[in-house]
Amino acid sequence: MRRIFCVALVLVVVASACTGSDEVAREGDIIVESGDTSVFEMRPGDCLYPGEELDEQVKNLPGMPCLDPHTHEVFAVWEAGDPDAFSAAADLDIGTYPGEGKLDDWAELACLTSFPTYVDANYFDSDLFITHLLPTLDGWQDDDMEIICLARTTGWLMASSIHCSSGLQQDLLVPLDTPPLESSTSEERAAAYLVPPDEACVATSTSGAS
């Protein structure tokens, strides 16, 4: 049961392996210690630094607290065909494996629709790109039907969550003079989120998302 790392709206090379060593540690839903995070356990608010290249099929990716420099963040997890993902979601026939092409099209729309709600900014006004993970045929046959939506940078690093942010590089970019992070408290790690990842952005809704 492995997932294909697919890309929506941006093209990257996917080639070599990338996994960490130990599993991530969590406090509640927030990652507090870096390590491998299973693609079957990812949730919105998980920050990742998979590096420049990825396997086409992956089971684990390097996760970390959002306070640490990273390039990716999970912003939505959908069950394929979920009618709540977007208005035409029910059009996906999930009685049998619909094929990578149809899943990819469905995931692209589901992730694009989910982006403004999580980031509190219009996708096309942000400096982030959208990627997603799809279940493989083998995974589908084992009842793995989840689509994982991720936002990514174009190589620059961020050290805060994109949740309820502007989605702009100038607000998320790690300052060049930031010293390496050796340790942090629970309060500091939680402060990487303007709003906890499981809460709505009403308190910071200033970006005019649509």
Image: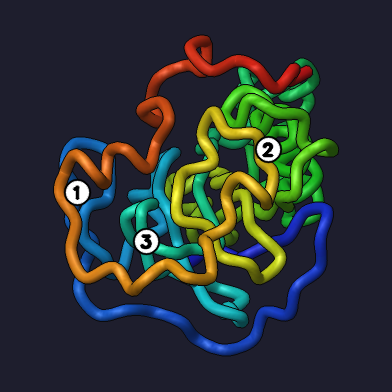
Please, what is the three-letter code of the amino acid marked with disc 3? Asp
Please, is residue 174 above or below residue 50 in the view? above
Q: Which residue is mark 2?
A: 111
Q: Earlier in the sequence, mark 3 or mark 1?
A: 1
The picture places residue 17, in percent across and down from the top left corner, at: 50, 86
Under circle 3, the secondary element is loop
The picture places residue 180, in percent across and down from the top left corner, at: 33, 73
Q: Nearer the viewer, mark 1 or mark 2?
A: 1
Is the C-beta separation of discs 3 and 2 under 8 Å? no
Looking at this rendering, what residue extends furthest in the bottom direction? 16
Q: Nearer the viewer, mark 3 or mark 2?
A: 3
Q: Distance of mark 1 from mark 2, alpha carbons? A: 25 Å
- The quarter in which the C terminus is drawn is top right
- The quarter in which the N terminus is drawn is bottom left
The picture places residue 45, in percent across and down from the top left corner, at: 42, 41
Q: Observer-nearest residue: 184 or 176?
A: 176
Please, what is the three-letter code of the amino acid marked with disc 2? Cys
Q: Is residue 32 left or right of residue 129?
A: left
The disc at residue 26 is 1
The disc at residue 68 is 3
Colour convention = rainbow
Which image quadrant is residue 43 in? top left
Q: Observer-nearest residue: 109 or 45?
A: 45
